[in-house]
Amino acid sequence: MEFVEINGINTRLETFRLKDPYQEKIILSSVLESGIREPLQCIVTAEKHFILIDGFKRYRAARKLALKTIPCVELSTDEADGILKLLQAGNSRTLNILEQAALVDALSSTHGLETAEIARRLEKSTAWVSTRLGILSEMSEFVKQEIFAGRFPARSYMYTLRQFTRVQKIKKSEIDDFVKAVAGKHQSTRDIDKLAYCFFFGGHETKDQIKTGNLSWTIGQLKHRDSNSVGVNPNDMNELEQRVIKDLKISQKYMNHILHSIQDERLKTASFFREALLLTEGILSRVGDFTHTLKLFVDTNHQKERHHDKRGQKKSGLCPVPRGQEQKRNSETAQNGQKNGQADYLF
């Protein structure tokens, strides 16, 4: 370990690591009280140039506190080798899957390593490498910048927006519009996920409210809707209706669980995959009928839901337009709103 002048450290690899404003505050406080206890890792070239590869949060804390020198250790003398070593150590430690993707992409695009070579050096499968190379190719440059800058949560992209682009075939430009509307607004990941469903499936008026930054009102409407749903008296339903509601809630809950857990790297035993593949094939064989039946239920009952709405207002999607901002809509817009209104049943 040696102490290196902070102004002499190259931080060009910073774009491969996610920023986290909350963690930055914690680290800043820790460095202020106790200094930098764990040295930063650098690639040290033959010319004694220090290229920072791990410890960017500590580095930024040190700059904010006007420290002149910081402790560093040499991870490698070669950039590609340094990235490989960081990936080997970080897989089980701190690297997010998007950070892994960015580093693997650098090995491929900048350093010219083939997929098979990266997999061999990391002792991973080629599928592991290909998956990470594919993640970044699905993202626009704008979305990538917002996520890595810490203005949009990586989790919301991976488990919500990415599913929209892959399954719902939402265009990248629309994903950009949503990220632009909510990035940096300090919303929780739960609220962002709900806003995403509202944005893409809630109708034109709802999308316009989010685009113009009216997030608080939209979230308020969602919470109001949730509270009304919770307040429904089960005694108003017969036994079959209560059972169907219970089954729908269970289905929604475990769909979310599976979406989040099925990509976890801790899934690795042969016995698990044998059983999981059999179950998955069984589920997939029924997905078509399941989806068709749910869509038919929504289509045939949407008009009933409108008719029985106590407010007597027409709704084009998940959230109605705020009072005083109602606009006249022609029949074509109303029809589009009815189709997009299927998001009402996602919450």
Image (cartoon, rainbow, N blue to C red):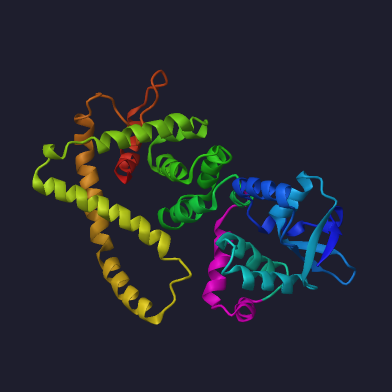
Choose between 156 and 334: the one closer to the eye. Answer: 156
Quadrant of the image occupied by residue 135: bottom right
Tell me if 86 is positioned left or right of 221 in this view.
Answer: right
Residue occupying image coordinates x 41% and y 65%: 262
The question of residue 127 being in magenta is answered with: yes
User: Quick one: quadrant of the N terminus?
Assistant: bottom right
What x and y, as percent, mark residue 116? 60, 80
Q: Is residue 268 above or below residue 170?
A: below
Tell me if 330 is positioned left or right of 100 in this view.
Answer: left
Q: Residue furthest top?
A: 324
Q: Is residue 139 above or below residue 176?
A: below
Q: Main secondary structure of the magenta part?
A: helix
Range of magenta residues = 114-142
What x and y, as percent, mark residue 214? 49, 30
What x and y, as percent, mark residue 108? 67, 70
Residue 205 visible? The answer is no
Tell me if 243 is positioned left or right of 22 in this view.
Answer: left
Quadrant of the image occupied by residue 54: bottom right
Choose between 82 and 301: the one closer to the eye. Answer: 82
Q: Residue furthest front?
A: 34
What x and y, as percent, mark residue 48? 88, 67
